[in-house]
Image (cartoon, rainbow, N blue to C red):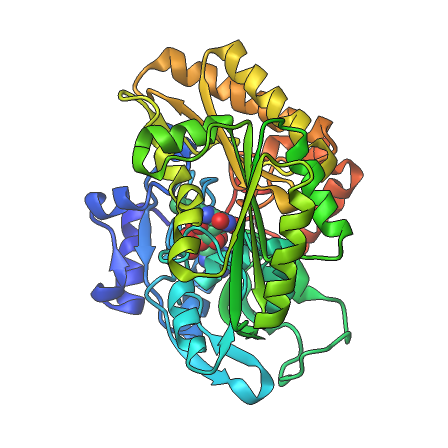
């Protein structure tokens, strides 16, 4: 089936309102937030906006029978080209299918369709004193379907883990149109060890095994109190050492973030009134829980961090907490402004390394930046070793583009060398596939076999992950 026949068939099947095929519309879908899609944007043949499992099933059957690629898409905030068609095919835009089917508060869970925005879900759950703890920086934009497909997380992962910990079951439409429910067809239980864990397999599968059409998700009680500590260090090594000291004192903060000197400078240059202290590193600890436990945790963190830090400030007062946190919350934006003619690119941006190797990794990234003559701003979720690197270049300059691609390649290799991974958060997509064998060895062959079992014709999001 050629492109125009496919477009006609889709319109016949779903109606004009649910199919996009104007080149201008298709161009919008040639991007996500990755640098890759800026370099090599590629239009799909058609975009569909399904609003029911039956519609998804029909589309899948058509694609399966005609060997047409299917690319599931949420909000397109991914950083790896994951939701972009590399060689034509149908993009399944699930972002308009944003229904919260049921908040089952008495069973501490919620059932929803894939297009619900993360922030909207938590707004709804707040009415029941519940929340879904993973908290990506893209909360106001990204969909829960995209979060499940990417196993997304954020700065609270250190205490609350990633999306996978919360997914109790999924409805998936497979490449051939079969519909499966993982986690038990009728189950509403929280604990379940029956059968092979297909839910875990699907979480983080980046749209290569099937389309997530419904999600059963576990919620947690909302903590009542919060506090923030800022610790300032003259020596980079003291920052990860302090993180360990805090853990060893029996405290598990809900967030532990680092800004190294490059990030501190970027923030101060972008918004001088924030006036972060000039230092080698700043750590921000967030703790949450009941008011007495938050108070206790804060006292311990102040005392423990004070042994190595030049200065530690602790606050539970809303206004001051917002001020302490502001530097971290604008770091990504500030990174993009360190050069007037430059912009921050998303490539090699979320490696994860063992805690004990964070300082060495940051030093090595600085050295790589110097080697290629590229400014790199470093910050991230140090509590779990997830380092965010923000290279800043002029993307219109081909020489700089070539250099930055070498730089991020070296950063990926560095992560593996440091006993870490090329991606702690954002996934593999199209950009990190080449490291799969190096990271996984023979296990990668088995991953390919699993892919074949679910998608024998290879139509599900080809060119991604595997
Ligand atoms: C400013 C910014 C901050 C960010 N911060 C974080 C962060 O803190 N933590 C983090 O983990 N990520 C972060 N990200 C990356 C991104 O937001 C997450 O990966 C998010 O989960 C992607 O959701 P999405 O709806 O945009 O998915 P998309 O980008 O549309 O898709 C992502 C992947 O999921 C697949 N997919 C989407 N929906 C489905 C579905 N229903 N069924 C099957 N497959 C599907 C796609 O095929 C693709 O492979 C950030 C991105 C930006 C732009």
Between 331 and 41, the one lying in front of the other is: 331
Q: Position of residue 207 (x, y in %)?
A: 52, 54
Q: Position of residue 109 (x, y in %)?
A: 56, 79
Please indicate whether residue 221 sits to the left or right of residue 393 in the image: right
Q: Residue at x 67, y 49 (%)?
A: 303
Between 403 and 288, the one lying in front of the other is: 288
Please indicate whether residue 230 sits to the left or right of residue 10 in the image: right
The residue lying furthest to the bottom in this view is 106
Q: Residue at x 59, y 27 (%)?
A: 234
- State the image quarter where residue 202 is shown: bottom right
Q: Is residue 74 above or below residue 179?
A: above
Q: Is residue 270 above or below residue 400?
A: below
Q: Is residue 226 visible?
A: yes
Q: Position of residue 299 (x, y in %)?
A: 63, 57
Q: Residue at x 64, y 68 (%)?
A: 293
Please indicate whether residue 13 sits to the left or right of residue 296 in the image: left
Between 426 and 66, the one lying in front of the other is: 426
Q: Is residue 64 above or below residue 100?
A: above
């Amino acid at each position: 089936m050629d492109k125009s026949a496919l477009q006609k068939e889709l319109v016949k099947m779903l109606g004009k309102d649910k199919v996009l095929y104007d080149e201008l519309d298709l161009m919008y879908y040639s991007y996500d937030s990755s640098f890759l899609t800026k370099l090599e944007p590629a239009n799909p043949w058609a975009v569909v906006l399904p609003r029911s499992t039956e519609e998804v099933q029909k589309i899948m059957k058509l694609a399966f029978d005609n060997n047409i690629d299917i690319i599931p898409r949420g909000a397109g905030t991914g950083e790896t080209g994951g939701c972009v068609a590399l060689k034509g095919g149908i993009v399944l835009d699930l972002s308009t299918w944003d229904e919260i089917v049921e908040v089952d508060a008495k069973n501490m869970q919620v059932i929803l369709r894939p297009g619900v925005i993360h922030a909207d879900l938590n707004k709804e759950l707040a009415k029941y004193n519940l929340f879904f703890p993973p908290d990506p920086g893209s909360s106001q934009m990204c969909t829960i379907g995209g979060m499940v497909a990417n196993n997304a997380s954020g700065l609270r992962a250190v205490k609350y883990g990633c999306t996978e910990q919360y997914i109790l079951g999924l409805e998936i439409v497979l490449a051939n149109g079969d519909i499966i429910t993982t986690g038990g067809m009728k189950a509403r239980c929280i604990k379940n060890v029956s059968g092979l864990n297909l839910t875990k397999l699907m979480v983080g599968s980046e749209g290569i095994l099937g389309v997530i059409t419904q999600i059963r998700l576990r919620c947690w009680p909302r903590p009542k109190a919060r506090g923030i500590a800022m610790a300032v260090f003259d020596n980079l090594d003291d920052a990860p050492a302090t993180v360990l000291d805090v853990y060893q004192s029996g405290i598990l903060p809900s967030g532990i973030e680092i800004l190294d000197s490059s990030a501190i400078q970027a923030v101060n240059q972008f918004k001088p009134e924030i006036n972060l202290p000039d230092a080698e590193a700043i750590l921000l600890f967030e703790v949450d829980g009941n008011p007495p436990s938050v108070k206790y945790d804060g006292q311990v963190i102040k005392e423990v961090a004070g042994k190595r830090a030049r200065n530690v400030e602790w606050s539970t007062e809303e206004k001051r907490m917002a001020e302490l946190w502001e530097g971290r919350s604008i770091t990504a934006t500030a990174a993009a402004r360190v050069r007037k003619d430059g912009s921050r690119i998303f490539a090699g941006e979320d490696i994860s390394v063992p805690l004990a190797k964070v300082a060495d990794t940051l030093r090595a990234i600085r050295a790589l930046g110097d080697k290629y003559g590229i400014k790199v701003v470093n910050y991230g979720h140090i509590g779990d070793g997830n380092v965010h690197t923000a290279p800043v270049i002029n993307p219109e300059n081909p020489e700089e583009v070539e250099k930055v691609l070498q730089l991020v390649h070296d950063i990926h290799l560095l992560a593996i060398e440091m006993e870490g991974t090329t991606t702690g958060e954002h996934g593999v997509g199209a950009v990190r596939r080449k490291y799969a064998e190096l990271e996984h060895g023979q296990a990668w062959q088995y991953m390919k076999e699993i892919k074949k079992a679910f998608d024998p014709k290879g139509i599900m999001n080809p060119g991604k992950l595997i």
